[in-house]
Image: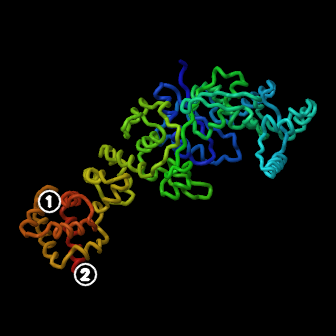
Amino acid sequence: MSEIRVRFAPSPTGPLHIGGVRTALYNYLFARKHNGKLILRIEDTDQQRFVPGAEEYIIESLTWCGIEFDEGVHKGGDYAPYRQSERREIYKQYADLLVEKGAAYYAFDTPEELDAIRKQYEAEKKVFQYDVFTRKHLKNSLTFTRKQTEEWLKSGKPYVVRFKIPENRELNIHDLIRGEIHVHTNTLDDKVLFKSDGLPTYHLANIVDDYLMHITHVIRGEEWLPSLPLHYLLYEALGWIDSMPQFAHLPLILKPDGKGKLSKRDGDKGGFPVFPCNWKNSDGEVFLGYREWGFLPEAFINMLALLGWNPGTEQEIFTREELIQLFDLHKVNKAGARFDPEKARWFNQQYIKRMPDEALLKLLKPLIEKEHFLYNDTMLLQVISLMKERATFVQDILNEGRFFFEAPKQFDENVIRKKIKPEVLPYINEVKEIISNIHEFKASVIDESLHVYVKQKNVGMGEVMIPIRLALVGTTKGPHLGQIMEIIGKNESLSRIETFASYLKTM
């Protein structure tokens, strides 16, 4: 079997949607499993929709995800250039070849003329398409004489090259995910292959590049499934049918309610990103990405891998190597995969829990330094060990454990009104005295001292522990009191308790 070669070929028309990242991921997993090559090709033939910065964003996003390419616009390779706008002369010769073979023709209709025809059809409640029936009555080299055609081409007037769909054929094409696909050619339209601006359309450039770059498998989104018959016919017309890659069309990623394709609007509405990294548009508006939301790239990739594919087991957390070994196109679903933002968060939470404390330390440090908090590595590792079970994102360790780094600025007044009685002040002062006399300031010793005190006073645990927790944290949340005090230290603990006691006296 020849070397497996797959490609991810996005268009730089805006930010990379997570559906595009998943396509890149499945290509990556397939290539790595079969010891093949993965190519990044930029398909920028639609100059009207080109967005500055989009290509750089695509590369940055895929790099963050850990999707590595063997060839591409950013790496070079034996089949460079990998940017289609730099290959236009290549496509022109194949467009000319298709015309010479009678598989394509020149079309001279202006956009205004075609719009007028469409409106006429609409008025008659019909749908117009340039196809085996209508092309016989339109302005093209099939209806013009050779002389008329030559004169038009020499005049410099705009024209396009359209593919000539064969009449009255039944096509049977195999898709690795969807099985056999049957299409009658009379239902297809004569797509434009080469535009008047001297650039090819996706259809021609895509086929030519896949052939010249020896692509063996085309793994792409479901939205390209309607183009499959045309691409099959192009391979056939160019005499490349024996070299045609195998096709696999991936299911859509659906909205959280399962009704339609996931869009940026759904993310805006639901408060979750649909892009891998932050995207800033030409108006300066910033759209949140998973990286900036706090996702670990490994968790993001794991979550995406299971949106449409499952190895057939109950396992949900996979290493990258496990994903590579288990990935199988035949186990990709045909139906769309519903995106669940809460499940996405769950994946990140699981990765945070499993991550070594030392690795989390490297991620947490910049956040702590940004706040200008004093810390040392030993302290941070203690905080991480206590807080990571509660964290969905790395920043949660700081946000939920801010009391480790600064004294509370306010206290939960609802709890004070409901739980704190005037007679609690003597308890607070006595606890302060107990804490000041502890020599081995360890969590176990502190907790034991507090339990002994509560037992001796014969009072409820909450009567003592709730006000002390409020003093240290500001709320009733957080780890064991002994653990908090050991980390912040004796002096800071006593200072906070004294501050809270003074606060209560003023109420």
Residue 78: x, y in percent? 60, 25
Residue 365 seen in the current view: no
Residue 23: x, y in percent? 53, 38
The residue singled out by tag 1 in the image is: 447
Q: Amino acid at mark 1?
A: Asp
Q: Which mark is residue 204?
A: none
Q: Amino acid at mark 2?
A: Met
Q: Could you give the CA–CA distance between mark 2 and mark 1, rounded to whole angstroms?
A: 29 Å
| Front residue of this view, candidates 245 and 336 | 336
Q: Residue at x 10, y 66 (%)?
A: 454
Q: Residue at x 81, y 52 (%)?
A: 123
Horizontal side of residue 360 vs 284, given as left or right? left
Q: Are marks 2 and 1 in contact (CB under 8 Å)?
A: no
Q: Quadrant of residue 205?
A: top right
**Counting other residues with Cα less than 10 Å from the Cα at mark 1, is it few (<14), some (14-19), or many (20 or more)?**
some
Q: Residue at x 68, y 28 (%)?
A: 171
| Front residue of this view, candidates 240 and 128 | 128
